[in-house]
Image (cartoon, rainbow, N blue to C red):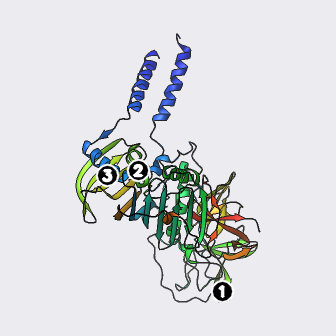
Amino acid sequence: MKFPILNRIACSVLLLAVGTFCPALHAADWGSLRGNNRSTPAPSAPRAQPQANRAPQPSHAPQPGIRPEPQPVVRTPEPRRDTQPSRSREQPHVVDRVQPRPVVVDRTHTGEVDRRRMDIDEDRRQSYFWSDFHAGMRIDRLPDGYRRIGIRGHDFFYYEGVYYDNGPAGYVIVAPPTDASIPDLPLGAETLQVGDTVYYYAAGAFYVQQPDGSFVVAAAPMGVTVALLPPDATSVVINGIGYFLADGVYYQPVMQNGVTAYLTVPPP
Amino acid sequence: MKRLLFTGYGLLLLAGCATAQEQTNFSPRAETVLRSAFHFLARTPAFSLSAEIWREHVDEAGQKIQFSRTVTMDVKRPDRLRLEISSPLSARGFWYDGKTLTILDRKHNWYGTAAMPSTLDQTLDAAHDHFGIDLPLIDLAMSDPYQNATAKVQGGRYFGVSPVLGVPCHHLAFTQSNVDWQVWIEDGPQPLIRKFVITQKNEPSAPEFTALITRWNVTDRIADSDFVFERPKDASKIEMRKDESGSGSVK
Protein backbone atom coordinates (compact mmCIF):
# COMPACT_ATOMS: atom_id res chain seq x y z
CA MET A 1 0.00 0.00 0.00
CA LYS A 2 1.50 3.30 -1.06
CA PHE A 3 -0.54 5.66 1.12
CA PRO A 4 -1.69 3.72 4.21
CA ILE A 5 -2.04 6.78 6.47
CA LEU A 6 -3.91 8.75 3.85
CA ASN A 7 -6.26 5.81 3.29
CA ARG A 8 -7.22 5.74 6.95
CA ILE A 9 -7.65 9.50 7.10
CA ALA A 10 -9.76 9.48 3.95
CA CYS A 11 -12.00 6.76 5.28
CA SER A 12 -12.48 8.61 8.55
CA VAL A 13 -13.27 11.85 6.78
CA LEU A 14 -15.67 10.05 4.49
CA LEU A 15 -17.54 8.61 7.45
CA LEU A 16 -17.63 12.01 9.12
CA ALA A 17 -18.96 13.60 5.96
CA VAL A 18 -21.71 11.02 5.66
CA GLY A 19 -22.78 11.70 9.21
CA THR A 20 -22.74 15.44 8.65
CA PHE A 21 -24.80 15.37 5.48
CA CYS A 22 -27.43 13.03 6.83
CA PRO A 23 -30.82 14.73 7.05
CA ALA A 24 -31.05 16.86 10.14
CA LEU A 25 -32.81 15.29 13.08
CA HIS A 26 -36.21 16.82 13.52
CA ALA A 27 -36.71 19.62 16.01
CA ALA A 28 -39.50 20.08 18.49
CA ASP A 29 -42.60 21.90 17.31
CA TRP A 30 -41.81 25.48 18.31
CA GLY A 31 -44.27 28.17 17.30
CA SER A 32 -41.64 30.14 15.44
CA LEU A 33 -38.91 29.66 12.87
CA ARG A 34 -36.45 31.07 15.40
CA GLY A 35 -37.38 28.41 17.92
CA ASN A 36 -37.23 25.58 15.41
CA ASN A 37 -33.90 26.72 14.00
CA ARG A 38 -32.30 27.09 17.41
CA SER A 39 -33.46 23.74 18.79
CA THR A 40 -30.56 21.44 19.60
CA PRO A 41 -30.20 18.15 17.78
CA ALA A 42 -31.18 15.05 19.70
CA PRO A 43 -28.64 12.66 21.15
CA SER A 44 -27.65 9.90 18.77
CA ALA A 45 -28.57 6.93 20.96
CA PRO A 46 -32.28 6.17 20.78
CA ARG A 47 -34.01 6.15 24.12
CA ALA A 48 -35.56 2.89 25.23
CA GLN A 49 -39.31 2.66 24.75
CA PRO A 50 -41.54 1.08 27.35
CA GLN A 51 -41.71 -2.54 26.34
CA ALA A 52 -45.02 -3.09 24.58
CA ASN A 53 -47.30 -5.59 26.22
CA ARG A 54 -50.16 -7.59 24.94
CA ALA A 55 -52.91 -7.12 27.52
CA PRO A 56 -53.42 -10.39 29.34
CA GLN A 57 -56.86 -11.89 29.71
CA PRO A 58 -58.76 -9.59 32.07
CA SER A 59 -60.75 -10.97 34.93
CA HIS A 60 -64.12 -12.37 33.97
CA ALA A 61 -65.40 -12.26 37.49
CA PRO A 62 -68.76 -10.64 37.90
CA GLN A 63 -69.05 -7.40 39.80
CA PRO A 64 -68.41 -8.54 43.38
CA GLY A 65 -70.98 -7.67 45.95
CA ILE A 66 -73.24 -6.04 43.37
CA ARG A 67 -76.73 -7.15 42.64
CA PRO A 68 -76.98 -7.70 38.89
CA GLU A 69 -79.07 -5.12 37.15
CA PRO A 70 -80.27 -5.06 33.58
CA GLN A 71 -77.61 -3.54 31.41
CA PRO A 72 -77.48 -3.22 27.66
CA VAL A 73 -74.85 -5.51 26.23
CA VAL A 74 -72.06 -3.47 24.73
CA ARG A 75 -70.87 -5.10 21.55
CA THR A 76 -67.41 -4.43 20.19
CA PRO A 77 -66.08 -5.31 16.72
CA GLU A 78 -63.84 -7.99 18.25
CA PRO A 79 -65.39 -11.38 19.01
CA ARG A 80 -66.20 -11.91 22.66
CA ARG A 81 -64.01 -14.37 24.40
CA ASP A 82 -66.50 -15.73 26.79
CA THR A 83 -65.05 -18.56 28.77
CA GLN A 84 -67.49 -18.13 31.64
CA PRO A 85 -70.11 -20.77 32.33
CA SER A 86 -73.46 -19.56 31.19
CA ARG A 87 -74.80 -16.84 33.40
CA SER A 88 -77.34 -14.16 33.14
CA ARG A 89 -76.79 -11.78 30.25
CA GLU A 90 -77.71 -9.11 32.71
CA GLN A 91 -74.32 -9.53 34.35
CA PRO A 92 -71.93 -6.85 33.21
CA HIS A 93 -69.26 -8.67 31.28
CA VAL A 94 -65.64 -7.89 30.83
CA VAL A 95 -64.48 -7.43 27.27
CA ASP A 96 -61.03 -7.64 25.89
CA ARG A 97 -59.51 -4.24 25.62
CA VAL A 98 -58.01 -3.53 22.24
CA GLN A 99 -54.93 -1.38 22.34
CA PRO A 100 -54.61 1.04 19.47
CA ARG A 101 -51.51 0.29 17.44
CA PRO A 102 -48.83 2.51 18.94
CA VAL A 103 -47.35 5.19 16.75
CA VAL A 104 -43.67 4.67 16.21
CA VAL A 105 -42.17 7.94 17.33
CA ASP A 106 -38.51 8.78 17.11
CA ARG A 107 -37.79 8.90 20.82
CA THR A 108 -34.31 10.24 20.28
CA HIS A 109 -36.05 13.57 20.75
CA THR A 110 -37.98 12.58 23.84
CA GLY A 111 -36.53 15.46 25.81
CA GLU A 112 -37.86 18.12 23.46
CA VAL A 113 -41.10 16.27 22.84
CA ASP A 114 -41.73 16.12 26.58
CA ARG A 115 -41.08 19.81 26.96
CA ARG A 116 -43.59 20.77 24.32
CA ARG A 117 -46.24 18.60 25.89
CA MET A 118 -46.12 20.69 29.02
CA ASP A 119 -47.44 23.61 27.06
CA ILE A 120 -50.44 21.81 25.57
CA ASP A 121 -51.08 19.07 28.06
CA GLU A 122 -53.98 20.86 29.68
CA ASP A 123 -55.89 20.50 26.44
CA ARG A 124 -55.02 16.89 25.79
CA ARG A 125 -55.34 15.57 29.30
CA GLN A 126 -58.96 16.50 29.64
CA SER A 127 -59.67 13.88 26.99
CA TYR A 128 -58.25 10.97 28.95
CA PHE A 129 -60.54 8.69 30.91
CA TRP A 130 -58.79 9.31 34.23
CA SER A 131 -59.16 13.07 34.03
CA ASP A 132 -62.81 12.82 35.06
CA PHE A 133 -62.17 11.00 38.31
CA HIS A 134 -60.56 11.63 41.68
CA ALA A 135 -60.18 9.72 44.92
CA GLY A 136 -63.32 9.65 46.99
CA MET A 137 -65.76 9.58 44.11
CA ARG A 138 -68.37 6.83 44.25
CA ILE A 139 -69.74 4.87 41.33
CA ASP A 140 -72.36 2.18 40.96
CA ARG A 141 -70.63 -0.15 38.58
CA LEU A 142 -67.20 -0.74 37.21
CA PRO A 143 -66.49 0.15 33.61
CA ASP A 144 -66.42 -2.65 31.08
CA GLY A 145 -62.92 -3.91 30.71
CA TYR A 146 -61.91 -3.44 34.33
CA ARG A 147 -59.13 -5.54 35.83
CA ARG A 148 -58.92 -7.07 39.26
CA ILE A 149 -55.64 -6.33 41.03
CA GLY A 150 -54.71 -8.17 44.20
CA ILE A 151 -52.33 -6.38 46.55
CA ARG A 152 -51.35 -7.98 49.83
CA GLY A 153 -54.54 -10.02 50.01
CA HIS A 154 -56.87 -7.17 49.12
CA ASP A 155 -58.61 -6.80 45.77
CA PHE A 156 -58.68 -3.53 43.94
CA PHE A 157 -60.11 -2.86 40.52
CA TYR A 158 -58.52 -0.88 37.76
CA TYR A 159 -59.43 0.74 34.49
CA GLU A 160 -57.41 3.22 32.45
CA GLY A 161 -55.51 4.87 35.26
CA VAL A 162 -58.33 4.78 37.82
CA TYR A 163 -58.31 2.48 40.84
CA TYR A 164 -61.47 1.33 42.62
CA ASP A 165 -62.19 -0.34 45.91
CA ASN A 166 -65.37 -1.87 47.23
CA GLY A 167 -67.62 0.68 48.85
CA PRO A 168 -70.77 0.56 50.95
CA ALA A 169 -73.02 0.92 47.89
CA GLY A 170 -70.93 0.31 44.85
CA TYR A 171 -67.33 1.31 44.44
CA VAL A 172 -65.17 4.15 45.58
CA ILE A 173 -62.21 5.57 43.71
CA VAL A 174 -58.96 5.41 45.64
CA ALA A 175 -55.49 6.78 45.20
CA PRO A 176 -53.25 4.48 43.15
CA PRO A 177 -52.09 1.82 45.61
CA THR A 178 -48.34 1.29 45.84
CA ASP A 179 -47.22 -1.98 44.22
CA ALA A 180 -50.29 -2.18 42.00
CA SER A 181 -49.22 -3.83 38.76
CA ILE A 182 -50.81 -3.11 35.39
CA PRO A 183 -49.88 -4.49 31.98
CA ASP A 184 -50.13 -1.23 30.04
CA LEU A 185 -49.75 2.42 30.88
CA PRO A 186 -52.82 4.64 30.91
CA LEU A 187 -53.11 6.88 27.89
CA GLY A 188 -51.38 10.19 28.41
CA ALA A 189 -48.64 8.97 30.73
CA GLU A 190 -45.67 11.37 30.96
CA THR A 191 -42.16 9.98 30.78
CA LEU A 192 -39.81 11.22 33.49
CA GLN A 193 -36.09 10.48 33.70
CA VAL A 194 -34.70 10.40 37.23
CA GLY A 195 -31.05 9.49 37.10
CA ASP A 196 -30.97 6.04 35.56
CA THR A 197 -34.62 5.30 36.33
CA VAL A 198 -37.47 6.02 33.98
CA TYR A 199 -40.81 6.81 35.57
CA TYR A 200 -44.16 7.13 33.89
CA TYR A 201 -46.65 9.49 35.47
CA ALA A 202 -50.40 9.48 34.91
CA ALA A 203 -53.41 10.28 37.04
CA GLY A 204 -51.33 10.84 40.14
CA ALA A 205 -49.35 7.59 39.95
CA PHE A 206 -45.67 7.10 39.25
CA TYR A 207 -45.03 3.82 37.45
CA VAL A 208 -41.81 1.90 36.92
CA GLN A 209 -41.59 -0.75 34.26
CA GLN A 210 -40.68 -4.22 35.46
CA PRO A 211 -38.53 -6.81 33.68
CA ASP A 212 -41.67 -8.69 32.63
CA GLY A 213 -42.97 -5.56 30.92
CA SER A 214 -45.64 -4.69 33.47
CA PHE A 215 -45.82 -1.33 35.23
CA VAL A 216 -45.87 -1.04 39.00
CA VAL A 217 -46.97 1.92 41.08
CA ALA A 218 -43.89 3.22 42.89
CA ALA A 219 -43.21 5.87 45.47
CA ALA A 220 -43.05 9.37 44.00
CA PRO A 221 -39.48 10.43 43.18
CA MET A 222 -38.40 13.76 44.58
CA GLY A 223 -37.29 16.68 42.48
CA VAL A 224 -39.31 15.94 39.35
CA THR A 225 -41.80 18.23 37.69
CA VAL A 226 -45.12 17.04 36.39
CA ALA A 227 -47.52 18.93 34.19
CA LEU A 228 -50.64 18.01 36.11
CA LEU A 229 -51.37 17.53 39.78
CA PRO A 230 -52.90 14.28 40.99
CA PRO A 231 -56.68 14.57 40.77
CA ASP A 232 -57.16 14.62 44.55
CA ALA A 233 -54.44 17.11 45.44
CA THR A 234 -55.37 19.67 48.08
CA SER A 235 -53.84 23.06 48.65
CA VAL A 236 -51.82 23.62 51.82
CA VAL A 237 -49.78 26.55 53.07
CA ILE A 238 -46.74 25.82 55.19
CA ASN A 239 -44.54 28.61 56.52
CA GLY A 240 -46.21 30.99 54.11
CA ILE A 241 -45.44 28.87 51.05
CA GLY A 242 -48.17 27.22 49.05
CA TYR A 243 -47.96 23.53 48.24
CA PHE A 244 -50.28 20.81 47.09
CA LEU A 245 -50.60 17.54 48.93
CA ALA A 246 -51.74 14.28 47.41
CA ASP A 247 -51.36 10.83 48.89
CA GLY A 248 -48.60 12.01 51.23
CA VAL A 249 -46.57 13.70 48.46
CA TYR A 250 -45.96 17.45 48.42
CA TYR A 251 -45.95 19.34 45.13
CA GLN A 252 -44.60 22.85 44.79
CA PRO A 253 -45.75 25.00 41.88
CA VAL A 254 -42.92 26.27 39.67
CA MET A 255 -42.65 27.88 36.25
CA GLN A 256 -41.16 25.41 33.77
CA ASN A 257 -40.83 26.06 30.05
CA GLY A 258 -43.15 29.01 30.37
CA VAL A 259 -45.99 27.11 32.03
CA THR A 260 -46.87 26.18 35.57
CA ALA A 261 -45.61 22.76 36.59
CA TYR A 262 -45.45 20.95 39.91
CA LEU A 263 -42.25 19.88 41.58
CA THR A 264 -42.22 16.94 43.99
CA VAL A 265 -40.53 18.03 47.21
CA PRO A 266 -39.81 16.44 50.60
CA PRO A 267 -42.29 17.29 53.37
CA PRO A 268 -41.65 20.94 54.27
CA MET B 1 -9.06 0.22 -3.52
CA LYS B 2 -7.32 3.27 -5.00
CA ARG B 3 -10.29 3.81 -7.33
CA LEU B 4 -12.64 3.70 -4.38
CA LEU B 5 -10.55 6.20 -2.49
CA PHE B 6 -10.36 8.63 -5.36
CA THR B 7 -14.11 8.34 -5.81
CA GLY B 8 -14.45 9.11 -2.15
CA TYR B 9 -12.19 12.15 -2.41
CA GLY B 10 -14.26 13.36 -5.34
CA LEU B 11 -17.52 12.96 -3.52
CA LEU B 12 -16.14 14.82 -0.54
CA LEU B 13 -15.09 17.68 -2.75
CA LEU B 14 -18.51 17.94 -4.38
CA ALA B 15 -20.29 17.72 -1.07
CA GLY B 16 -18.08 20.41 0.37
CA CYS B 17 -18.85 22.71 -2.53
CA ALA B 18 -22.56 22.10 -2.12
CA THR B 19 -22.42 22.94 1.57
CA ALA B 20 -20.37 26.05 1.06
CA GLN B 21 -22.76 27.33 -1.54
CA GLU B 22 -26.00 26.41 0.40
CA GLN B 23 -27.93 25.52 -2.69
CA THR B 24 -31.12 27.55 -2.77
CA ASN B 25 -33.90 27.64 -5.29
CA PHE B 26 -35.47 30.92 -4.39
CA SER B 27 -38.16 32.23 -6.71
CA PRO B 28 -37.35 35.90 -7.37
CA ARG B 29 -41.01 36.80 -6.86
CA ALA B 30 -41.11 34.97 -3.53
CA GLU B 31 -37.96 36.68 -2.37
CA THR B 32 -39.19 40.11 -3.39
CA VAL B 33 -42.53 39.76 -1.62
CA LEU B 34 -40.99 38.28 1.52
CA ARG B 35 -38.27 40.90 1.70
CA SER B 36 -40.81 43.66 1.29
CA ALA B 37 -42.95 42.30 4.13
CA PHE B 38 -40.13 41.85 6.59
CA HIS B 39 -38.43 45.13 5.78
CA PHE B 40 -41.72 46.91 6.37
CA LEU B 41 -41.96 45.20 9.73
CA ALA B 42 -38.35 45.90 10.65
CA ARG B 43 -38.85 49.62 9.98
CA THR B 44 -41.97 49.73 12.15
CA PRO B 45 -40.88 50.97 15.58
CA ALA B 46 -43.91 49.59 17.39
CA PHE B 47 -46.83 47.38 16.54
CA SER B 48 -49.51 45.23 18.07
CA LEU B 49 -51.42 42.27 16.72
CA SER B 50 -53.99 39.66 17.61
CA ALA B 51 -53.84 36.11 16.31
CA GLU B 52 -55.26 32.66 16.64
CA ILE B 53 -52.67 29.91 16.73
CA TRP B 54 -53.33 26.24 16.13
CA ARG B 55 -50.91 23.51 17.04
CA GLU B 56 -51.34 19.92 15.89
CA HIS B 57 -50.50 17.00 18.11
CA VAL B 58 -50.27 13.41 16.92
CA ASP B 59 -51.69 11.10 19.55
CA GLU B 60 -50.75 7.54 20.42
CA ALA B 61 -53.10 6.15 17.78
CA GLY B 62 -51.71 8.41 15.06
CA GLN B 63 -54.67 10.78 15.01
CA LYS B 64 -53.89 14.48 14.58
CA ILE B 65 -55.61 16.74 17.10
CA GLN B 66 -55.52 20.52 16.87
CA PHE B 67 -55.36 22.80 19.88
CA SER B 68 -55.82 26.52 19.68
CA ARG B 69 -54.86 29.62 21.58
CA THR B 70 -55.41 33.31 21.12
CA VAL B 71 -52.38 35.53 21.18
CA THR B 72 -52.00 39.27 21.50
CA MET B 73 -48.58 40.77 21.04
CA ASP B 74 -47.18 44.26 21.54
CA VAL B 75 -43.69 45.02 20.35
CA LYS B 76 -41.68 48.18 20.80
CA ARG B 77 -38.26 48.00 19.25
CA PRO B 78 -35.58 47.38 20.33
CA ASP B 79 -36.31 46.09 23.82
CA ARG B 80 -39.96 45.79 24.80
CA LEU B 81 -42.37 42.88 24.41
CA ARG B 82 -45.76 42.01 25.80
CA LEU B 83 -47.69 38.83 25.06
CA GLU B 84 -50.94 37.30 26.20
CA ILE B 85 -51.57 33.66 25.36
CA SER B 86 -54.93 32.26 26.36
CA SER B 87 -57.32 29.39 25.91
CA PRO B 88 -60.45 28.27 27.76
CA LEU B 89 -58.17 26.30 30.11
CA SER B 90 -55.33 28.73 30.69
CA ALA B 91 -54.23 32.33 30.40
CA ARG B 92 -50.65 33.57 30.59
CA GLY B 93 -49.10 37.01 30.34
CA PHE B 94 -45.51 37.74 29.37
CA TRP B 95 -43.70 41.03 29.99
CA TYR B 96 -40.21 42.01 28.90
CA ASP B 97 -39.21 45.53 29.96
CA GLY B 98 -35.62 45.63 28.79
CA LYS B 99 -34.15 43.72 31.72
CA THR B 100 -36.62 41.22 33.18
CA LEU B 101 -38.96 38.63 31.75
CA THR B 102 -42.05 37.97 33.84
CA ILE B 103 -44.60 35.26 33.20
CA LEU B 104 -47.97 35.34 34.93
CA ASP B 105 -50.22 32.30 35.19
CA ARG B 106 -53.52 34.14 35.42
CA LYS B 107 -55.52 31.03 36.23
CA HIS B 108 -53.59 30.34 39.43
CA ASN B 109 -52.34 33.89 40.06
CA TRP B 110 -48.69 32.77 40.13
CA TYR B 111 -45.81 34.52 38.44
CA GLY B 112 -42.13 33.90 37.81
CA THR B 113 -39.35 36.25 36.79
CA ALA B 114 -35.90 35.95 35.27
CA ALA B 115 -33.21 38.48 34.42
CA MET B 116 -32.76 38.91 30.70
CA PRO B 117 -30.34 40.63 28.29
CA SER B 118 -30.95 44.17 27.19
CA THR B 119 -32.23 43.57 23.66
CA LEU B 120 -35.29 41.78 22.38
CA ASP B 121 -33.30 39.51 20.06
CA GLN B 122 -31.05 38.30 22.84
CA THR B 123 -33.94 37.92 25.25
CA LEU B 124 -35.99 35.78 22.89
CA ASP B 125 -32.99 33.54 22.36
CA ALA B 126 -32.25 33.35 26.08
CA ALA B 127 -35.88 32.48 26.87
CA HIS B 128 -35.68 29.68 24.32
CA ASP B 129 -32.18 28.41 25.11
CA HIS B 130 -32.15 28.64 28.91
CA PHE B 131 -35.79 28.28 29.88
CA GLY B 132 -37.27 26.36 26.97
CA ILE B 133 -40.00 28.96 26.57
CA ASP B 134 -41.94 28.81 23.34
CA LEU B 135 -43.24 32.25 22.40
CA PRO B 136 -45.24 31.99 19.20
CA LEU B 137 -44.78 34.50 16.38
CA ILE B 138 -41.56 35.92 17.81
CA ASP B 139 -40.13 35.92 14.29
CA LEU B 140 -42.09 39.12 13.78
CA ALA B 141 -40.34 40.79 16.72
CA MET B 142 -36.77 40.08 15.64
CA SER B 143 -34.75 43.13 14.67
CA ASP B 144 -33.94 41.65 11.25
CA PRO B 145 -36.93 39.44 10.56
CA TYR B 146 -35.94 38.75 6.96
CA GLN B 147 -32.53 37.40 7.91
CA ASN B 148 -34.08 35.45 10.77
CA ALA B 149 -36.68 33.84 8.51
CA THR B 150 -34.37 32.97 5.64
CA ALA B 151 -31.31 31.85 7.63
CA LYS B 152 -31.91 28.18 6.85
CA VAL B 153 -34.13 28.39 3.78
CA GLN B 154 -33.16 26.12 0.94
CA GLY B 155 -35.91 27.01 -1.48
CA GLY B 156 -38.87 29.34 -1.91
CA ARG B 157 -41.82 29.41 -4.29
CA TYR B 158 -44.57 31.85 -5.13
CA PHE B 159 -48.15 30.57 -5.46
CA GLY B 160 -50.04 33.70 -6.47
CA VAL B 161 -52.71 35.63 -4.60
CA SER B 162 -55.31 33.96 -2.43
CA PRO B 163 -57.57 35.25 0.34
CA VAL B 164 -56.96 34.97 4.06
CA LEU B 165 -60.03 35.97 6.05
CA GLY B 166 -61.14 37.92 3.00
CA VAL B 167 -57.85 39.79 2.53
CA PRO B 168 -55.99 39.13 -0.77
CA CYS B 169 -52.53 37.82 0.08
CA HIS B 170 -49.45 36.63 -1.72
CA HIS B 171 -48.91 32.99 -0.89
CA LEU B 172 -45.30 31.90 -0.47
CA ALA B 173 -43.82 28.55 0.52
CA PHE B 174 -40.32 27.80 1.76
CA THR B 175 -38.41 24.68 2.54
CA GLN B 176 -35.64 23.94 5.03
CA SER B 177 -34.05 20.75 6.20
CA ASN B 178 -35.88 20.85 9.55
CA VAL B 179 -39.25 22.38 8.64
CA ASP B 180 -41.27 23.67 5.73
CA TRP B 181 -43.19 26.89 6.13
CA GLN B 182 -45.70 29.01 4.31
CA VAL B 183 -46.66 32.64 4.66
CA TRP B 184 -49.49 34.74 3.31
CA ILE B 185 -48.65 38.43 2.90
CA GLU B 186 -51.25 41.10 2.33
CA ASP B 187 -51.31 42.48 -1.18
CA GLY B 188 -51.36 46.22 -0.65
CA PRO B 189 -49.48 49.26 0.58
CA GLN B 190 -48.84 47.58 3.92
CA PRO B 191 -47.44 44.09 3.23
CA LEU B 192 -48.53 42.57 6.51
CA ILE B 193 -48.34 38.88 7.32
CA ARG B 194 -51.82 37.44 7.65
CA LYS B 195 -51.15 33.70 7.97
CA PHE B 196 -48.16 31.58 8.85
CA VAL B 197 -47.79 27.79 8.81
CA ILE B 198 -44.83 25.73 10.02
CA THR B 199 -44.83 22.05 9.05
CA GLN B 200 -42.81 19.65 11.19
CA LYS B 201 -42.03 17.51 8.19
CA ASN B 202 -39.55 15.23 9.96
CA GLU B 203 -42.02 14.17 12.63
CA PRO B 204 -44.57 11.37 12.13
CA SER B 205 -47.65 12.69 10.36
CA ALA B 206 -45.94 16.07 9.91
CA PRO B 207 -47.93 18.09 12.46
CA GLU B 208 -48.33 21.78 11.79
CA PHE B 209 -48.32 25.05 13.66
CA THR B 210 -50.68 27.63 12.16
CA ALA B 211 -51.11 31.29 13.01
CA LEU B 212 -53.92 33.46 11.67
CA ILE B 213 -53.29 37.12 12.39
CA THR B 214 -56.69 38.72 12.73
CA ARG B 215 -55.67 42.26 13.67
CA TRP B 216 -52.68 44.45 13.01
CA ASN B 217 -51.93 47.90 14.34
CA VAL B 218 -48.72 49.50 13.17
CA THR B 219 -49.52 53.05 14.14
CA ASP B 220 -50.08 52.70 17.86
CA ARG B 221 -47.76 54.47 20.19
CA ILE B 222 -47.24 52.07 23.02
CA ALA B 223 -46.03 53.49 26.33
CA ASP B 224 -43.06 51.86 28.06
CA SER B 225 -45.23 51.42 31.11
CA ASP B 226 -47.35 48.91 29.18
CA PHE B 227 -44.40 46.53 29.22
CA VAL B 228 -43.86 46.69 32.97
CA PHE B 229 -45.38 43.88 34.99
CA GLU B 230 -47.76 45.00 37.71
CA ARG B 231 -48.29 42.29 40.25
CA PRO B 232 -51.98 41.43 40.55
CA LYS B 233 -53.52 41.45 43.99
CA ASP B 234 -52.68 38.28 45.91
CA ALA B 235 -50.42 36.96 43.16
CA SER B 236 -47.64 34.74 44.48
CA LYS B 237 -44.17 34.49 43.10
CA ILE B 238 -42.91 31.04 42.17
CA GLU B 239 -39.54 29.82 40.97
CA MET B 240 -38.83 30.01 37.25
CA ARG B 241 -36.76 26.94 36.54
CA LYS B 242 -34.16 26.57 33.88
CA ASP B 243 -34.87 24.18 31.08
CA GLU B 244 -34.35 20.49 31.63
CA SER B 245 -33.75 17.84 29.00
CA GLY B 246 -37.06 16.20 29.83
CA SER B 247 -40.23 17.25 31.58
CA GLY B 248 -39.03 15.77 34.86
CA SER B 249 -35.41 15.08 34.33
CA VAL B 250 -33.31 14.88 37.45
CA LYS B 251 -29.61 14.23 37.02
Is residue B87 at all visible to an observer of this figure? yes
Q: CA distance from mark 1 to mark 3?
A: 71 Å
Q: Nearer the viewer, mark 1 or mark 2?
A: 2
Mark number for residue B201? 2
Residue at x-position 53% and y-position 52%: B123
Q: CA distance from mark 1 to mark 2?
A: 54 Å
Camera-side residue of A197 and B184? B184
| B156 sits to left or right of A156 | left
User: Same chain for marks 2 and 3?
Assistant: yes
**Amino acid carrying mark 2 in the image:** Lys
- Percent across and percent down for residue B215 are 34, 66
Q: Disc 1 on helix, strand or loop?
A: loop
Identify the residue position indicated by label 3 in the image. B37
Q: Nearer the viewer, mark 2 or mark 3?
A: 3
Identify the residue position indicated by label 1 in the image. A65
Q: Disc 2 on helix, strand or loop?
A: loop
Category of crowding for the residue at label 2, using alpha-carbon neighbours closer than 10 angstroms: few (below 14), some (14–19), many (at least 20): some
